[in-house]
Image (spheres, helix red, strand yellow):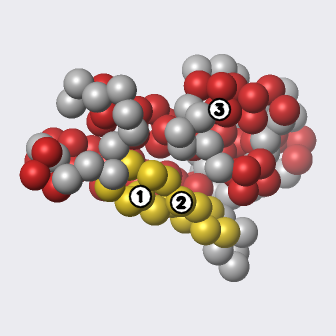
Amino acid sequence: MSPDQIEFLKGEYPDFWNENLKSLPAGHWNLIARLFHQCALIAADNGSTEPWVALHFERLEDGLFRAYAAPLVDFQKWTDGSALALIIALQFFNERQQSICEVCGLPGGRHCISPEFCAGKVEKWDA
Ligand SMILES: [Zn+2]
């Protein structure tokens, strides 16, 4: 990711930011931003200013990241909707990396057919 992308995520989502993510490809910025945003919404939707989950990231052998979430509040407080939203957000992040270009962020595969294809098509990353 670019320094700007990293600074934005660190500043906006300090509870979820993890230094390991510095090596996340720039094209996958929207995926991580969406995951962070969704996790922030789960707390906000339940009237909480504290995070409801801790996120952990593992780098897989194929170079992709896998996100895990550990609940920080008692399960009885979770609504079905919030629990489902978390599962969907995690699955979205974990699976979409395989079909989003690491360079430009366009859908298709992990890489566009050629570097020229990415050039000039770099997805606007600001939220
Ligand atoms: Zn591309």
On the image, numbered disc 2 is attached to which residue?
56
Q: Residues within 10 Å of mark 1 (few under 14, many from 20)?
A: some
First along the sequence among labels 1 and 2: 2
Check if mark 1's residue and mark 2's residue have beta carbons within 8 Å: yes
- From mark 1 to mark 2, how far is it between C-alphas? 6 Å
Q: Quadrant of residue 16?
A: top right
- From mark 3 to mark 1, how far is it between C-alphas? 17 Å
First along the sequence among labels 2 and 3: 3
Residue at left offset 75%, top offset 35%: 6
Q: Label 1 is placed on what type of residue?
A: Ala
* Residue 61 versus residue 122 in the image, above or below: below
Picture quarter with the C terminus: top right
Q: Quadrant of residue 125?
A: top right
Residue 8 versus residue 24: which sits nearer the camera?
Answer: 8
Q: Which mark is residue 69?
A: 1
Check if mark 3's residue and mark 1's residue have beta carbons within 8 Å: no
On the image, numbered disc 3 is attached to which residue?
9
Q: Label 3 is placed on what type of residue?
A: Leu
In the picture, measured across the screen, residue 98 lies left or right of residue 75, that is right
Q: Does residue 119 show up?
A: yes
Q: Label 2 is placed on what type of residue?
A: His
